[in-house]
Amino acid sequence: MTGDDVRVQPDLAADAESQASYHRELFDALYRWPQFWLEAVDMAGDDACARELGLDQLGHFGPRGVALVIDRLVRATTGPLTRILEIGSGFGGALRQAARELHARGLRPCLLGVELVADHCANAAAISRTLGDAGPPIVHADARQLPLRTGSIDAVFAAGSASHFANTAEVFAECGRVLRDGGVLVMTEEVSVRAAGAPEPGDAFVKHHPPDVFHAAAPQQRRHELIAAGLEIEIRESLVRWATPLLRQRVHALRLLAHCSRRMFGDHAYERMVGTLTSAADEYERGSIEPVLVVARRVAR
């Protein structure tokens, strides 16, 4: 497979446009990556320090979220771990970080990403080239129709992307199809899970998490979708205590580096990033949103 393998249904055009528009507004700097990277190196002092900033991983949980997912994935895997798929790869930052986390454990499986937005795939390739990191390939494809054989994947993960899927039932069904018996799906859901009876998220959260980009679901809905996909939930872990201070720390870092961050991202994007992280942490504390990590295993067919 290559980045030219495209299987995106026409009815997803609106969803792809919503995702593309939102991410371009927030992360416009990543679309001019070569210039952005020079600024990052200048700010950090050298290439190695700039890489550690995780500037290609600007989701809610960043590199630490990827590390958590990969840790749980490795712990949960039984049998071979030779082929791993990421769904919703965006600009490729999480997939590249996953490769680093696995390599640090002495593991070098084949990794592959799929991404709905064509521009994100192109930017992911440009970022990899600039970093001098070939990185795992990312295929432009619909996660509801994965271009993979049934039972061909040992593990699937989503580190920051699950909240962006408009139809998780069909996505999970495809994950269940491509996973081998005993294979695992590991994902974090940062801002989509809302328990019945929980307070409604406030205006600041809705402003920074538009509902056509971040899709809400009740815990019971997720459970039914996973079971219907042939996936048995083994772990459902609330991340409130872990995620709330993490988001506060990320906001603190942005504010400490406000001058550099505004110069690199622009004032509007900087304010949006701070607002996004702050409003999510506020809602975690209010109990309106529950960040969770899920490990589910493919039952025998």
Image: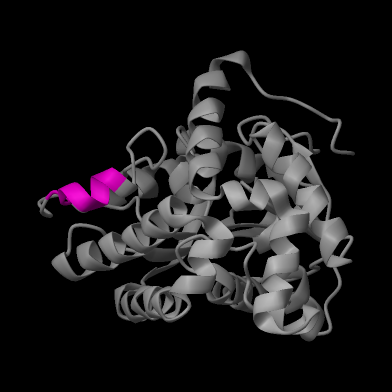
Is residue 165 visible to us here?
A: yes
Name which quarter of the figure residue 84 lies in. Answer: bottom right
Q: Which secondary structure type mostly characterizes the magenta part of the structure? A: helix
Residue 70 x, y percent position in the rendering: 63, 72
Region of the chain picked out in magenta, as a range: 200-207
Which residue is at a point 43% across and 56% down the rendered structure image? 267
Q: At 89% across and 66% down in the image, what residue appears?
A: 132
Above or below: residue 118 compared with residue 51: above
Q: Residue at x 34, y 81 (%)?
A: 245
Residue at figure coordinates x 89%, y 39% from the top left: 2
Residue 138 painted magenta: no
Vertical position of residue 38 compared to residue 19: above or below: below
Q: Position of residue 185 (x, y in %)?
A: 59, 57
Model colouring: one colour
Camera-side residue of 233 and 253: 253
41 or 242: nearer the eye? Answer: 41
